[in-house]
Image (cartoon, helix red, strand yellow):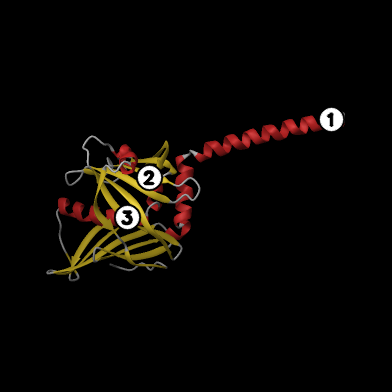
Amino acid sequence: MTLFSMNKWISAILFIIFLIATACTTDRSTDPQYIIDRSIGVHGGSRYLQSEITFTFRDIDYLARRQNGLFSYERRITDNQGEIHDVLNNDGFTRKINGEKVSLDEEWSGRYQRSVNAVIYFALLPYPLNDPAVRKRHLGMEIIKDQEYHKIEVTFEPDGGGTDFEDIFVYWIHPEHYTMDYLAYVFFTDDGGIRFREALNPREVGGIRFADYNNYRPLSLTDSVYDMGTAFNEGRLEMVSFIALEHIEVNQPTFRSP
């Protein structure tokens, strides 16, 4: 074989390797599981797995604790009844008032459980997006505020998806930094509705990334959750609240009786 022929074969092989590598990169770049995994890694990764996170939201103290498959989500409220301590963990939900366990019917237990879970779910995003009941779908790329984003749909399996398994979420993930900068969701409890959140004030505490949010709702009843990026760009949303996490701390978990 001449030197020219050898160089020709080497060039052909290198070109084939390049095509395969490019194809693999392209496939991964639109794989919603890959994108969510990268986003979770950027926001805190394995630090979520062994952590005790405390924060204050609207003057209520919350705690999220995880260790070796065990979890405990808690909140403490002080009102005219005294101190209310709600706990959602692997064993279910309990409420104590001034240290005494309260008997709750199924409806009220479900309400309190959803309330505790929702606040901590949003605070820990995107970590919960790898829960077993989560289904992910790449909806293409979308531009928000002149920046292109991966647009990821998240829905839930009925088995393991909780009482709100019919809710639909959409997340906008930065294609280079893999930060979760926007999200939208449609919910059906408490009269239902659609919300769009814009992440603000991102900061890192104990190796985990947290953010506050401007919280919007659509002006038009015809807009769906999938239209929220366009509606935001066109000024067709109204702000309903500002969501801020205060006094955030991240420590090593210590499980004890609630």
**Image position, residue 15 (x, y; %):** 69, 33
x 36%, y 53%: residue? 199
Point out which mark residue 4 bears. 1
Q: Which of marks 2 and 3 is nearer the N terminus?
A: 2
Question: In the rendered view, does 257 fall on the left or right side of 174?
Answer: left
Between 59 and 111, the residue placed more toward the observer is 59
* Vertical order, 8 against 177 (above or below): above
Q: Are marks 2 and 3 in contact (CB under 8 Å)?
A: no
Instruction: Work out how far the residue at label 1 is from the one at label 3, CA to CA, in angstroms.
Output: 62 Å
State which quarter of the image contains the N terminus. top right
Q: In what element is the residue under mark 3?
A: strand
At label 1, the amino acid type is Phe
Q: In what element is the residue under mark 2?
A: strand
x 66%, y 36%: residue? 18
At label 3, the amino acid type is Tyr
Q: Residue 92, can we see it?
A: no
Q: Residues within 10 Å of mark 3 (few under 14, many from 20)?
A: many
Q: Quadrant of residue 206?
A: bottom left
Task: Give the residue pinned by disc 2.
Answer: 171
* Vertical order, 37 against 123 (above or below): above
**Image position, residue 172 (x, y; %):** 40, 45
* Vertical order, 116 against 172 (above or below): below
Between 23 and 226, the residue placed more toward the observer is 226
Q: Which of marks 1 and 2 is nearer the N terminus?
A: 1
Point out which mark residue 213 bears. 3
Which residue ends up furthest to the right in the rendered image? 2
